[in-house]
Amino acid sequence: MKDANNDNGNETSKTIFVVRHGVARHNVADAQTGQMPNLHNPSLLDPLLIMYGEEGVQRARDLLLHHHAREQQQPPNQTHYVPLVDLVVTSPLTRCLQTAHILFHDRSAGPIPPFLCHDGVREAFGCHYPDKRQPKSKLQSEWPNVEFDAAMTE
């Protein structure tokens, strides 16, 4: 791949991180009955991450930072050494926006990359409520740091 920012014409490479969202409400069985949620229940519309899911994403972020520090031959305790990220592309499902935010926006150091939300990276467009997203206007008000694809409908 030729880097457009590379004046000397040398080839460079880009790393792409593909991350699945953390655990959300619809991914866990009921604690009392052991039954999985009914995905046709409207209360599961675009469910949020649960605490366990948020913690899992935070652990993934820490592993990413540790891995990057190792690749850059930095001591592993320097968790502030963050990989440079050019762009974060996320699905408009709230759990995905939360995951992307925890991984790449909640940073103690380093630049915050631009975020782009695109319907085309959703895992499913099914008939189950967890596969349905909030209206675009609501998502935009809740995620002001995210650019939403212009082709995305309400």
Image: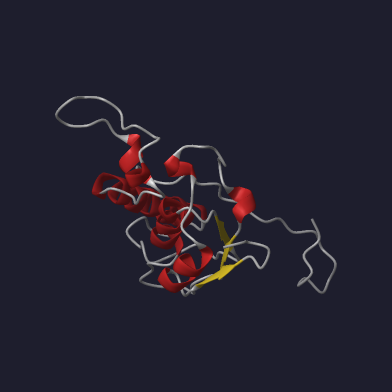
| Residue farthest right in this picture | 9
Nearest to the observer: residue 41 or residue 11: 41
Q: The N terminus appears in which quarter of the rendering?
A: bottom right
| Residue farthest top in this picture | 34
Residue 20 x/y as whole percent: 48, 44
Residue at 34%, 32% in the rendered image? 38
Q: Where is 87 relative to 23, above or below?
A: below
Total marks in image: 0
Instruction: Say which quarter of the image contains residue 13.
Output: bottom right
Residue 132 x/y as whole percent: 49, 47
Residue at 60%, 54% in the rendered image? 119
Nearest to the observer: residue 128 or residue 34: 128
Residue at 49%, 70% in the rendered image? 140
Q: Where is 44 relative to 35, above or below?
A: below
Residue 54 x/y as whole percent: 31, 51
Compared across the picture, whether 147 is left or right of 33 comes to right
